[in-house]
Amino acid sequence: MKQENPAAWVMSEAGFDANDGTRLFYRTWAPRAPRTDAPQRALVFLHRGHEHSGRIAQLVERFACQQDWAFAFDARGHGHSPGERGAAPGFATMVDDLDAFVRHIAQLHGIAVEDMLVVANSVGAVVAATWVHDYAPRIRGLIMAAAAFSIKLYVPLAKPGLRFARKFKPNLFVTSYIRPGMLTHSPEEAQAYASDPLIAKSISAQILLELADTAERIVQDAAAIDVPVLMLVADKDYVVHEAPQKLFFERLSSPLKRYVRLRDCYHAVFYERDTSVAMQASREFVEACYATQPLPAAHYADADRTSASARAYAALERNEYGTAFTRASHAMQRSMLKALGPLSNGMRIGLTHGFDSGESLDYVYRNQAGGRLFGAFMDRGYLDAVGWRGIRVRKVQLQALLADCIAAHDGRTPLRILDIAAGSARYMLETVKRFQERDIEVTLCDYAQHNVDRARQLAADLQLRAKVDCRLRDAFDPASYAGEEGRYDIVVVSGLFELFTENAPVLTALQGVVRSLKPGGCVIYTAQPWHPQVEMIAGTLTNHRGVPWRMRPRPQVEMDALVRLAGAAKERTLIGVDGIFTVSVARKAAAPGAAG
């Protein structure tokens, strides 16, 4: 449905399919006089919690970007989108919905992600910041108004109380305590809010708690974000605290960032009695963003030496992390691990082969606790650690993307797959087993002979019809890819680059990977942009080389840039538990004149 706007746009309503198949409602404001001398630009608006995209129309006019497109969707459980009011399957789903929406816009209207700028309010601002951190879209900029990194709940111990209550009532909802007059000084805007039948008055306690947990993670790791950011902060905000917003801003790595504290302003920044300062700052920021190109891929080549993550890793190497008490605690844990760890099957494998070894990963994938005496109890706790839960989710996501890529092959020629660091290749071979009717050739490489032997044995045990070739190869040696140019349809790199802090060998391997791909072929790669236990792991566990397992989580934006430098462009990312691991697929450019 299209509606004429007397100003500069034609508004229409439609729907898009989220990644789980849910149909969500959205609005489009198409410019009457779009740009003809430059690429099309778009502002993507995210409404605050409780609200819907219908309240965005006045913002489109106030931003006054009359030659630009504007889009806004109703978050699930809000407005005309389905779902219980104020609820969603999880906060991560809300972030994934934004990613699906932006990809829908890009595909339908041909507007490059690099030419989009996101404007987000309150809860929407945290959704947008999480999306930028986890998915690393190359957007032109982000405007965050009254970001809900920490909501003022006023009731003492509210969050622990909600966590406890959800054990008995998982579907608990919390009714908003905010009155319209606490959002804005404008009586007209307060009345419009109060009388809007589509505004949800409550929010799922699950979403509220996951919002808080995710916000804490994003503020802590804000240095991984380097897109331009404007923060509009209300000085009299009854809904959210200012301190986390300020901390987030200070930690940003963005070369263009601005912090505007709005005087005598309540939470609904864009719906206040006087929005002149906020709108002027926003319009100036929009123009500054579009006058500046996104950071090039080459910018990240030496991020292993110059970035915030590099500095954090250097501190780990010097044992200058945390406090003296923290380091003493880790020393005690190391001693206990050596004494009691052998009772646990999983810990014994880690102590023998390294906690990052293929043997450890195989055990984690099986997820069957065992040990001597009370070791099985210890083992259950070990296997349930957040990192290992994330590893298991990563395997599921990797297999899902691999299956999608296999299914998309036209079948006119044999499908050739290469895994450059396969380990035992269980995730690969189990997936290929589901395509026994296809003509598939699989090449499995690893630097360790015992992994090559295990992969060969597993392929025999699974009785695969596919041709499986197991080779002893070093993924970081350019010679490993010699003679393989343009041979493969799919290349998989799983769990490898996370183990190495330097970018040069990673780029060397990726260049070999992309050379090995046919034009239009895809590479599936994993990353670890974040981990909440980096210091504990460095202080207590050893890796496959028998030295302390010190990790440098490589931000997603950096990982994707290395892939671009090698010659492939990312198409999609799946996010795992707490954003610890990701699985992405990128594609090598098709040959000139190729169909499709």
Image (tube, grey):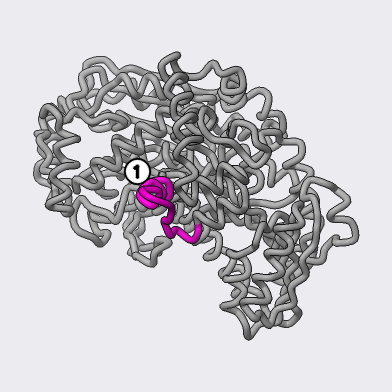
What range of the chain is rendered magenta? 365-383
Of all residues, the one furthest to the front in this rendering is 373
Horizontal side, residue 301 vs residue 34: left or right = right
Residue placed most toward the observer, 416 or 433: 433
Which residue has dot 1 on it? 46
Q: Is residue 150 above or below residue 527?
A: above
Residue at 40 percent across and 48 percent down: it is: 375
Residue 429 on image: x %, y %:
62, 70
Residue placed most toward the observer, 397 or 343: 343
Q: Is residue 303 above or below residue 86?
A: above
Q: Is residue 137 above or below residue 284?
A: below
Q: How many labels sit on residues?
A: 1
Of all residues, the one furthest to the bottom in this rendering is 437
Residue at 76 percent across and 52 percent down: it is: 447
Residue 537 on image: x %, y %:
51, 33
In reply to whether residue 380 is colored magenta, the answer given is yes
Q: What is the crowding at mark 1: few (fewer than 14 residues within 10 Å), some, or many (at least 20)?
A: many
Horizontal side, residue 398 vs residue 85: left or right = right
Q: Secondary structure at mark 1?
A: strand
Q: Is residue 263 above or below residue 65?
A: above
